[in-house]
Image: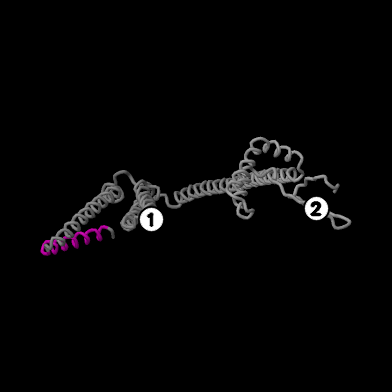
Amino acid sequence: LPAGEPVVVDFCREAALEAAATTPVLFAQAWHPEYAAVERTTEIRARAKSFGLSEDEVKAAVKVVNDNAKKSWEKTAKLWREDSGVHIAITKAFQQEIEDKKRKEEEAAEARRREEEAGDEERQKALDALEKKREAKRKAAQEAEEKRKRRQKQLEEERAQRDPWLNLPEVVGAEKKVEELKEARRDANAKLEFDLSTQLTKDIAAAERAYKKAVKTSRKAWKKHGGPPPASSGGDGESAGVSEAAAKGGDELKSLKAQLSDIKAKKAEAAKEENFEQAKALKKEQQAVEAKIKKLEL
């Protein structure tokens, strides 16, 4: 260092001072340009006791700091920011950090977008594959249904040739009744209506017995007449009255079941009211009606 010439260095950065021999050097630390006036005055008050300053000296020092801050602090700080390598490096570091963060966020957003697009493509492929499977399943079900109908038609034709009396109206009607009851029972089972399903099972049994009886009667009539029996068979009367007898029996069975339900309700009400004599009489009526129903269902 030239003797007698002051040199200002940024004490925030590393600095080294060398000499060939022992040399006296005066080192004075000044306020950093970025150190604001309020920070300087606070520091003065905090160290006043250490420095041995009186209250008047503290006020005078604070006044000097404030006066100079008003006049030149912004100008000095601006000059330092322009020429200070530390400030420039720090600014660049912060700016680089912001840019790196922004770049990473953009890269992450782009990666998520690509991943979502890939996921959408995979999802669409899966949906297309699922739709193809469903379409194939619907087509297979349709073909199976058509095959079943063709087979059913073939069986009906074969049956018509083998057992032509099965195509008589009373037999067809009895068979249709059985199928309708079975379909109703399937619906009841699907809806978990077990009481209705139980009753339909009994109705199906009765309808199947009526169907067998109709088949037997129609077969006898067919063989007797060598073909379809006439509308009225005179002395025979059996085949002509099959449908009427079956209908009459069905109506009677329905009426008896309704009567049975009514008796059961009255019996329950009598038992609830502790009218045991009436309940006993109703029980006998119930047993009589149940016997009649059982006889008709045989």
Q: Quadrant of the C terminus?
A: bottom left
Q: What main secondary structure does the magenta stretch of the protein show?
A: helix
Give x and y (percent) for residue 33: 70, 43
- Closest to the camera, between mark 1 and mark 2, is 2
The answer to whether residue 20 is magenta is no
Give x and y (percent) for residue 102: 67, 43
Any part of residue 216 in sight = no
* Near-viewer residue (264 or 110): 110
Give x and y (percent) for residue 38: 60, 43
Magenta part of the chain? 276-296
Look at label 2 and name its amino acid. Answer: Val
* Near-viewer residue (72 or 25): 25
Query: Of all residues shown, which one is farthest toward the right?
Result: 20
- Image point 77% across, 44% down: which residue? 85
Q: Classify mark 1: helix, strand or loop.
A: helix
Q: Mark 2 points at which residue?
A: 25
- Image point 25% across, 50% down: which residue? 251
Q: Which mark is residue 189?
A: 1
Look at label 1 and name its amino acid. Answer: Asn
Query: Is residue 285 shown left or right of residue 185?
Result: left
Does 100 sit above or below residue 257?
Answer: above
* Near-viewer residue (134 or 212): 134
Give x and y (percent) for residue 282: 15, 60
